[in-house]
């Protein structure tokens, strides 16, 4: 599988998708990659089966024209960015289309409403399905009406739990921090204070401070190995709390949150359950999800010569 140095943005004409497109274009310009804009549409399943004589009023050509108009609007919006732009108008389930296209790009970007509900039309299922199934990192950009994009990226936080997937997320966060000259904070958490969950079986004699100290020591080892001689300072915090809650709180003070998709029930594992949905729903800033599979698919690093 070959991944080209391309940032792919999924659009549907909605304000959240265009807001995410702006983020994708800015990121592509920063690292010198091509921007590929995709709009996918599907004919409602009831149309051919039940509309009978009314089918002509909802035919493929009419829907395609609407999708093409949304794509044209997106292209016009990024015309002044100086980024090379290509487009694709695809027929099919939007989530499936973008997941398949992710096999050939290095970064996918989509948007959400950002206040408890995902944008409808293509962004309804895409914002949750794409991060979990993509073959490249995915950035989900929460929509903030009348708000400036969190760019340039000056502060990044990455969730680390020691799993292989989280290590992949850490490596990508280090690359992003290097390119943007951003402050990077690595966070590891243990839900001690709740008295439930993974640590609920521990005896009361176990010192929570000792647990956090052990967690911090493991975090230091993981981060030091990931840096491997890079001249980058990474702040480290081992905290009492769950992955989604900690990262959602950090998201109010940073420009990008980076997580993996599969791990040990802390940060990386959340993309497959309710915890991940909580973060994607409530994060105040874009969330970059780095799938575990990307470590085996040979994605090229972010260009070191990025502006």
Image (tube, rainbow, N blue to C red):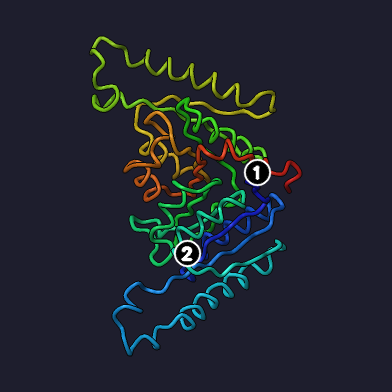
Could you say which is closer to the camera, residue 264 or residue 205? 264
Picture layout, residue 132 above or below residue 61: above
* Residue found at x 48% / y 54%: 141
* Residue found at x 50% / y 41%: 291
Instruction: Say which element carries label 1.
Output: helix
Q: Quadrant of residue 303?
A: top right
Q: Which mark is residue 180?
A: 1
Picture layout, residue 51 above or below residue 245: below
Q: Position of residue 244 (x, y in %)?
A: 37, 39
Q: Which residue is mark 2?
A: 146
Could you say which is closer to the camera, residue 307 or residue 167? 167
* Local crowd size for mark 2, using a 10 Å CA cut-off: few (<14), some (14–19), many (≥20): few
* Local crowd size for mark 1, using a 10 Å CA cut-off: few (<14), some (14–19), many (≥20): many
Q: Position of residue 277 (x, y in %)?
A: 36, 47
- Report the residue that reaches farthest toward the right: 305
Q: Separation of disc 1 and disc 2 at Cα?
A: 24 Å
- Report the residue that reaches farthest toward the bottom: 53
Instruction: Point out the tag, 1 or 2, that comes first from the N-terminus.
Output: 2
Q: Position of residue 232 (x, y in %)?
A: 65, 29
């Amino acid at each position: 599988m070959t991944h080209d140095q391309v940032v792919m943005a999924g659009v549907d004409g909605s304000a959240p998708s265009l807001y995410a497109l702006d983020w994708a274009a800015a990121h592509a310009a920063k690292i010198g990659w091509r921007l590929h804009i995709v709009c996918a549409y599907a004919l409602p399943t009831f149309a051919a089966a039940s509309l009978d004589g009314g089918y002509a009023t909802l035919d493929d050509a009419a829907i395609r024209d609407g999708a093409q108009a949304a794509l044209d609007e997106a292209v016009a919006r990024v015309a002044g960015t100086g980024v090379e732009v290509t487009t694709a108008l695809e027929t099919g389930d939007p989530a499936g289309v973008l997941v398949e296209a992710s096999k050939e790009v290095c970064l996918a970007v989509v948007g959400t409403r950002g206040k408890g509900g995902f944008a409808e039309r293509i962004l309804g299922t895409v914002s949750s399905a794409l991060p979990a199934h993509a073959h490249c990192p995915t950035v989900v950009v929460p929509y903030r009406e009348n708000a400036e994009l969190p760019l340039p990226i000056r502060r990044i936080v990455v969730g680390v739990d020691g799993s292989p997937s989280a290590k992949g997320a850490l490596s990508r966060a280090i690359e992003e921090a290097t390119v943007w000259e951003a402050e990077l904070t690595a966070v590891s958490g243990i839900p001690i204070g709740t008295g439930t969950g993974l640590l609920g079986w521990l005896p009361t004699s176990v010192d929570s401070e000792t647990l956090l100290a052990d967690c911090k020591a493991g975090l230091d080892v993981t981060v030091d190995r990931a840096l491997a001689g890079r001249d980058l300072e990474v702040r480290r915090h081992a905290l009492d709390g769950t992955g989604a809650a900690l990262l959602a709180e950090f998201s109010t003070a940073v420009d990008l949150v980076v997580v993996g998709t599969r791990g040990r029930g802390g940060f990386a594992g959340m993309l497959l359950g309710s915890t991940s949905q909580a973060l994607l729903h409530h994060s105040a800033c874009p969330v970059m999800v780095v799938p575990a599979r990307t470590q085996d698919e040979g994605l090229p690093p972010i260009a070191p010569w990025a502006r």
